Amino acid sequence: MDASRGNDVLPESATAEEGVKTESGGGDSSARRITAMLIAPGTIWMLLFLVVPMLMMVYVSFWTQKTFSIEPTLTVKSWVAFFSSETYFAALLRTIKIWLIVLATTFALGYPTALFIGLFIKNKTVQTIVLVLCVVPFWTSFLIRVLAWRPMLGKEGAVNIVLEKLGLIAEPIEVLLFTEFSVVVGMTQIYVVFMVGPIAFMLSRIDPSLIEAARDLGAGTWRIFRTIIFPLSLPGVVVGAIFVSVMVLGEFATSAALSGRKVNLLGNIIVTQVGSLKWAFAAVAGVILTAVMAIVVAVLLRFVDLRKEL
Amino acid sequence: MTAILELKNVTKRYGGDTALDGLSVTLEANEYISLLGPSGSGKSTLLRVIAGFEKPDAGEVLLEGRSLAQVPAYRRGIGFVSQGFALFPHLSVFENVAFGLRNREDDPLQDAAELRRRVDEMLALVGLSDLGERGIDQISGGQKQRVALARTLVADPKIILLDEPLGALDANLRARMRVELRRIRQQLGITFMHVTGNEEEALAMGDRVAVLDSGRLAQISDPDSVYNRPQSARVAKFLNCYNMFEGRRDEGGAFHAGVSSFACSPGAAAAGVYCVRFDKIRVVPLQGLSEDGGTGVRATFITSEYAGPRITYFFRGADGKVLEVEYHLSHRRPDEFAVGGDYWLSWSPDEALVYFQ
């Protein structure tokens, strides 16, 4: 018995070892080559279309702007103009204000929704279906979704008609449309789903036995939410906040369509300046916007160690 | 001995499946009771009903004589240590243990010094004094087990329910935690109920062993009785150390199972199950048959499994059934058998257990 087993096993293990050797023999350099080949397209793409344009933008912001042309003579004139102009500096502050409001509204609306999807719906399939339902509005074009708020919020829009018919108001409310309010409403509706998704994902990953354990240890529902559920969903909140922040800070279309050009954000300024060929000035606004975004993302990432959490 | 927890005719159904079927059992104060059953026997459901995570469809649970029907999980004073430990990953070891004292609905502990004293005391009891500030991802599986236990114990529960507490640990650690669990329990004098699917663990841990089968209590007694005198063929089967033959006893006291027949205690003819423990069998060469006083069965040797202190031999009986024979190697060397060779598996009829339906 022993002898026959030995005969069976020996040749097999020998071939297996040979196989491993040939594979690992050329392994080191070929593995490195494969690594290089895999990361090359991404790296080249990012260099060409992210790093170089960003450096270019910073560089152009110091060029000299003539009426209809731009010259590569370095100057800080555009920078001085930006910060000394009431209009442009106010746009920066307004951008930050609208961003903070939209961040708050998307969180206030998004967190309960995510809580329902991620924690209360136990069935994974139903969870996915509901999340997909959240994305359904994206099947319509962005501009249509934004413009659809006009007949909703306008002086003779749906909201005013309903309120008047109910007898709640005598005169139509005019501040609904073409104000910061309408911009906030539009942005909240469009971006709230980016808050819901990551939070729902984190919530659905919470092991139900943790909640059971907390309950067994005597904690009530609100305590469990505050001490267990919310802290564990925090990485989702941060990711959602990064999504919303980056998109809202760079926004120009919603504010253009829903503010009647009364609410100018940094994004709107860039569009106008580029439209009138003021490249240097647009570059200044671009650099400032990028810097604001970088700070926001860096600060948000300080709250959680995403690498550890995801 | 005083009863601390009583279950009376507890029934729990999930849809059409009956997880607990009119189960009654009494837990004594200050005992270690292990609950053995195959998966699907209802043992986890039983724990969840006691802990208050599930409501029984019928019957009642009494803690120290009072019904728990209207008492929510967090007011029962029953600790629950779940299978995966369920430690809070965002809190340190200390914070995990302090969680219940600090966050419980009834009378939360506000005094920081008192909190620290009690948590430190509990960490010392489970041997984790130096690890309080560690994160949950910075400790080993065995340490997690201790944290989970300390977190539950710190609130002075009357009973601790442990759901397969050693399942997530490697074999080495499991053996050590067995001793630890029993030591901790003895030191505190509270009742532990330990659910396991492992018969060896159930026998080793429990002052009493309860065997659960299809939502009913099949047997509850001391480990020695469960092991040596299982009350039914089902219990013998869970113990995983009996060769079992289904068949019929005739009036002459012979038990017929397929082509084999064994000596059996005489009595009325009846269908039944004939069980012989693995370690009660001797393997004899076919020639030596006449000298052997026992009864037995002819079988073909397949293979063996060596496990240090014992060796298990696998044989195939005439009807294709695999039979196991276990030799303890304390005072002998393992025997060599030829693969494919025929042997006689012999045992004394007194050692066989026969269950009639």
Image: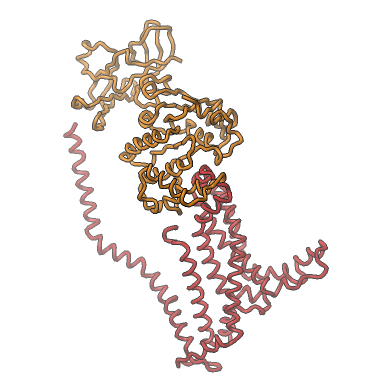
Chain colours: A red, B orange
Is A35 positioned to the left or the right of A215 in the image? left
Q: Is residue B12 above or below residue A148?
A: above
Q: For this rendering, which residue is in front, A80 or B261?
A: A80
Q: Tell me where residue A303 appears, x and y as whole percent.
A: 48, 63
Q: At 27% from the left edge and 16% from the top edge, which residue is drawn?
A: B346
Rendering coords of residue B73 (x, y %) = 55, 39
Residue in the picture at 34% in, 35% down:
B179
Q: Nearer the viewer, residue B227 or B284?
A: B227
Given residues A261 and B144, the one toward you in this image is B144
Towards the viewer: B258 or B307:
B307
Horizontally, residue A108 falls left or right of residue B191, namely right
Quadrant location of the C terminus of chain A in the rendered image: bottom left
Up the image or down, A167 lies above or below A69; here it is: above
Q: How many marks?
A: 0
Residue A28: x %, y % from top left:
25, 62
Residue B84 lies left or right of residue B351; in this view the side is right
Q: Position of residue B223 (x, y in %)?
A: 38, 25
Left or right, A135 with reference to B328: right
Quadrant into which the N terminus of chain A falls? top left
Residue at 51%, 84% (x, y): give it.
A284
